[in-house]
Amino acid sequence: MRDREAAPLEAALRTAVRGEVAFDAGARALTTMDASNYRRVPLGVVAPRDTEDVAAALEVCREHGVPVVPRGGGTSIAGQATGTGVVLDLTRHMNRLLSLDAEARTAVVQPGLVLDRLQEAVAPHGLRFGPDPSTHGRCTLGGMIGNNSCGSHSVAWGTTADNVRTLEVLTARGARLRPGRGWAGAPDGLRELAGSRLELLRTGFATDLPRRISGYALDALLPERGADVARSFCGSEGTLGVLTEATVRLVEAPRAVALAVLGYADETAAAQAAPGLLPHRPLTVEGMATDLVPSAGGLPRGGAWLFVETGGANGTEARARAERIVRAADALEALVVTDPAARRTLWRIREDAAGTATRMPDGTEAWPGWEDCAVPPARLGAYLRDFRRLLAAHGLRGVPYGHFGDGCVHVRIDFDLLTERGVARYRRFSEELAGLVTSYGGSLSGEHGDGMARAELLERMYGAEAVRLFERAKGVWDPDGLLNPGVLVRPAPLDANLRFAPLPREPVDVEFGYLADNGDFRAAVRRCVGVAKCRTTTTAAGSEVMCPSFRVTGEEAHSTRGRARLLHEMLAGEVITDGWRSEEVRDALDLCLSCKGCRTDCPVGVDMATYKAEFLHHHYQGRRRPAAHCSLGRLPEWLRAVDRTRLARVVNALAAVRPAAALGKRIAGVAPERAIPRLAPTSFTREWERRPPRALHPEGVRRPEGEGHPDEAAHPDGVAHPDGGRTVVLWPDTFTEYLSPSVGLSAVRVLEAAGLTVTLPPVLPPGGPRIADGRTAGLRGALAVLAAGRRRGRVCCGLTYLSTGQLDRARTVLRRTLGLMEPVLDAGLPVVVLEPSCGAALRSDLPELLPGDPRAGRLAAAVVTLAEALERHAPGWTPPRLDRPVAGQTHCHQHAVLGDAAERRLRGAAGLTGDLSGGCCGLAGDFGFQPGHQEVSVACAEEQLLPAVRAAGEDAVLLADGYSCRTQLDQLAGKRARHLAEVLAEALDRDEGKD
C-alpha cells in the first residue's frame, strides 16, 4: 500500500484520531530507522493523544489490514522500532508521569515518558527507577518495558521486568487488559497455553542467567513464579499489545555514591574479576577496554577497567565500601572518585560508548547486530577469549564493553554491510556467534531485544519446540499478526531490510572534503547510528550544546538524528525523491542553528552544520536564494563597502528611523522583530592606525618602549620566530572590524601588556618591506603592497558564506585569504582569532573546503584563541586580578571546535570565578535574524543563557566572547556583555591608573 492506496487509511485515521496523523514523505523518512542496522519504510505516523486515540488507531488499522508498530525514543538496536505500516509515536503526547506514591514507592507512567524525567520527579523523595540504560536521557519507559532494558545498575536493582507492577495494554483487536500477577490481565487462552506446556517452561528457559532477554519470558507464567502476566509481557518488543500505562516500582536512591575505577591488563582479566566483586553488593560493575577510550588520562594504569559504583548513607560510608572493593579486586591500579563532577566525567566515557564504538580507532565504521549477548558472569572471561578468536577467524574487529557484572557484553563490529560479500560474512558470523553464545549457556540478547537482528536464530538458543510456543503465544495476544510483524516470531531474515541497501553505490559529488570519512558524503551521513543523544531535552550547565533546536521544539525533524535520517533518505531516493531539491530536508535544516554542538557532543561526531552548508549549496545552485543569503550571507562585503565610503553614521541614523529600518529589513530578509545592530563609526583597522606610535623595530615591527626582541640577532627582521616567537598576527574578523572594534583594541592592549608584538595581516614575505601594525614601513612598502594587489582588511574566514551554503564564494574568499596569509604561514606565526565562530571556521571548515591546498591545514593549525596565545607565547605573564564572579556563555563554536580549557585557566588566573553557561545563545550568526526564527531563537536563549544572567549578582562580570551572544543579550535582556579581552584590558588600564 503506497501513495494513492494509503489515502483511505490516512483519511480514516484523521477522522478517528485527535492526535497528529502524518503520511507525508518527511514524517515517514524520520521513522524508517531506529538505532539498528535495519530500515523499514512506514505508510505513516500517528501521534495519539491518549489511550482512546491508541484504540481508535488500532481499530482503523485493523479494518485496513495494516500493521502497527509502537515507537518510543527510537533507540532500539535490533530494528524493532521500525515497521512497514503505521508507526505510533508515543513520545509526543503520552509522555507524562500520572501519579507518584512515594510511600509505596510506585509511579504510574505513560509509555512516552523519558526515563530522566521520571528520575528527576522522584529524586526529591530519595527514590529512583532502578534500570538505567546509557540512553537514559532519551529512552522512554514504554521502550524499556518493550525491550526489558537493564542498564548499568542491574546488578543492584535488576531489569525493567523486575521493576514493573502492573501494565495497561491494548491488544490489536481492542481488548483493554491490565496485566499483573496471578494471571491478572491475561488474554483469553494464555493460561491454557501455559498450563499445557509447564514442563517446557520449567526446563527450556535458563534461570541462572541475569540477562536472559531473548524471546518471550513465558516462564514468568509458571505458578511458582506468580503467574506474572506483566513480567511475561516485558521484552515482547511491541508484538503482543500496545502499552498505554505502567505502574513501576521505585527503589531508594543511595544518599552518597563513590566510584571505584579498577585497572586490569585486558578485558579478559577485567571480566574474570567482575564476579568476585558481586558479594560486596556494588551498584554497578561495568567494563570497558582501552580501545574504547580516546585518552586514558585520569584512569588507573591498565588496558581495561571496571567501573564499580558503591552507595552509602553518607560519603564516608560510600567511600569505605569502594575502598573495600579496591582491596578485594586484585587490580593493577585503582582510583576511588567521590566528587560528583569527576564521576560524571568518567561515566560519560562509558555512556557515550554506544556511539563512540561505531568507529574503530582507525576510523573504520563499526555496526551493531551483536550488540548485547550475555553469558553467565562466571564464564564471561572465557567467552570473551573465544569471542575474540571468532572475530579474528572472520577477519573482523570489535570493541567489547558493557555490564560485566551481569555477563552482558556490548560490541560494535566492523561488518561490511555495503556489499553482497560483506553481508554474507555478516550472516555466517552471526550464525557461528549464536552457536558460541548458546554453548556458554548464554542469551542472544542481554538487554536490547532480538528484533530483526537475532530473532531468526532464537531456535538455536531455545530449540524448535520453544520457538513454536512463542508463535502460539503471539497468536493468543495478536491473532491477526498486526503488531510489529517480522520481529521475534516468524522473523524477517537477519540480512534483510538493511538500512544501507538503498544508498547510492557510487560516491556523491560534494563540495566539502569530509576528511574523517575518506571524502565520502554517504559515510558522513551514515555516522548517525540513532543513539539519539541529540534528543535529550536538558543538558548539564556548561557541558553540552547539542541539540538546541530539538530542545526547543521537541520535534524529531529538528534533532541532529532526524536531520541525518532525512539526508539518508534523500540519498536513498525512495521516500524523498527530489534529491538536493528536497523541501523536507530544507525545512528540517532551516531550524539548525549551525552551532556545531553535534560535532563534539554527538558520540559519533555528526557535523550537521557542515551537512547543512553542503545541502544549501546544492539546493540553491542555479536558483534564487533567500534575501538573507544575499544580505547577511555577504555581510563582509556590505560592511566593507560602508567602511570604504565612510557611511557608517548614515546607516546607523537610517536604522534608527522606524519606517526606514522596517523597509531595510524587509528588503534584506531580516526578521522584523530584530533591531539592526549599530555599525562602528570607525573600523578596528582605522582605529589601530590612529593609535599613538610606539617604538618601531628598524624593519617596521612595533615594540614596547625600551624593549627589543630577545632573539633579534637571530631574527633581524623582528617578525619570524618559528620556535614560538614574540610576534602574533591578530585576525581582523568582520565582527571585530566593523561592529565591535573595542574587542580588537582591547586584545592588542592585553597582548602587548604580555610582551607580545601584534601585527595585522597582510604581512609581506621575508626580504621585502613588512607591514606591521597594519601600516607599511615607508613609501617603498606601500608601493609593494599596491603592486602585490593586497589591500588591507581583505582576509576573511568565509563564515557567512559557509553558513548560508554559498560554497563557491566561500572557496574564492578562502583561497584569496590563504594567498594573503602565506607570509604568516611561512614565518610560523600564531594567528590570534578573537571571534570564536571565525576561529572555528578557519580551524575546521577551511581544511574541509580546500582539502587539496596544504596552506589550509597550515593556517588551521596556526589559529589560536587569545587565551591560547597568552598561555603558549607569554607563559610568564600574569593577568590583572579582578576577583569577581562571572556570568555569560561559552560560545557554542568554542565548545565544539576550539575548546575553552585555556580560557578557563586565564579566567582563573585573573580571579574570575564560576562557570559560564552552555547551550547556544540562539542568535547564532544570521539564524536569529532570519524571518520565522525569532521564537526559536528566544527559546534557545531562555534555556541556559538568560536564566544564568538573571541569576548573576550585581558584581558579576558578564562575559560573551561571541558577537552573536553579546547581541542576543543586548536585544533580549538589555545587558551589555563583554569579550574577555575587554575585561582584561579595562583591568590593565585601571591598574596602570593606580600606578
Image (cartoon, grey):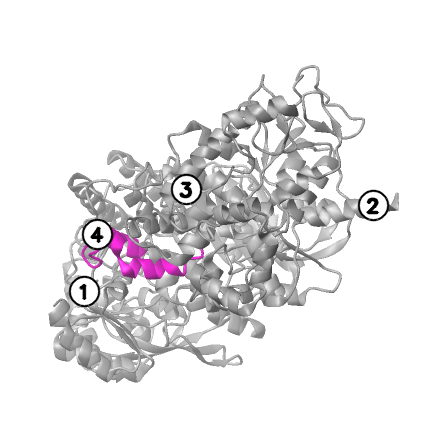
Q: CA distance from mark 1 to mark 3?
A: 43 Å
Q: Specify the farthest residue to the right.
A: 995
Q: CA distance from mark 4 to mark 2?
A: 64 Å
Q: Residues within 10 Å of mark 1 (few under 14, many from 20)?
A: many
Q: CA distance from mark 4 to mark 1?
A: 17 Å
Q: Nearer the viewer, mark 4 or mark 1?
A: 4
Residue carrying label 1: 84
- Residue name at image x 16 percent, y 39 percent: 421
Using the image, determine if residue 725 lies above or below residue 287. above
Q: Tag 1: residue type?
A: Thr
Q: Which residues are magenta?
A: 565-593
How many discs appear? 4
Circles 1 and 2 in contact, beta carbons < 8 Å: no
Query: In this rendering, would 66 be left or right of 988?
Result: left
Instruction: Locate residue 16, reporting x and y percent.
Output: 23, 84
Majority secondary structure in the magenta region = helix
**Mark 4 vs mark 2: which is more N-terminal?**
4
Q: Tag 2: residue type?
A: Asp
**Mark 1 vs mark 3: which is more N-terminal?**
1
Residue carrying label 3: 810
**Circle 3: element type:** helix
Circles 4 and 2 in contact, beta carbons < 8 Å: no
Q: CA distance from mark 3 to mark 2?
A: 43 Å
**Mark 4 vs mark 1: which is more N-terminal?**
1
Instruction: Locate residue 141, reporting x and y percent.
Output: 39, 70
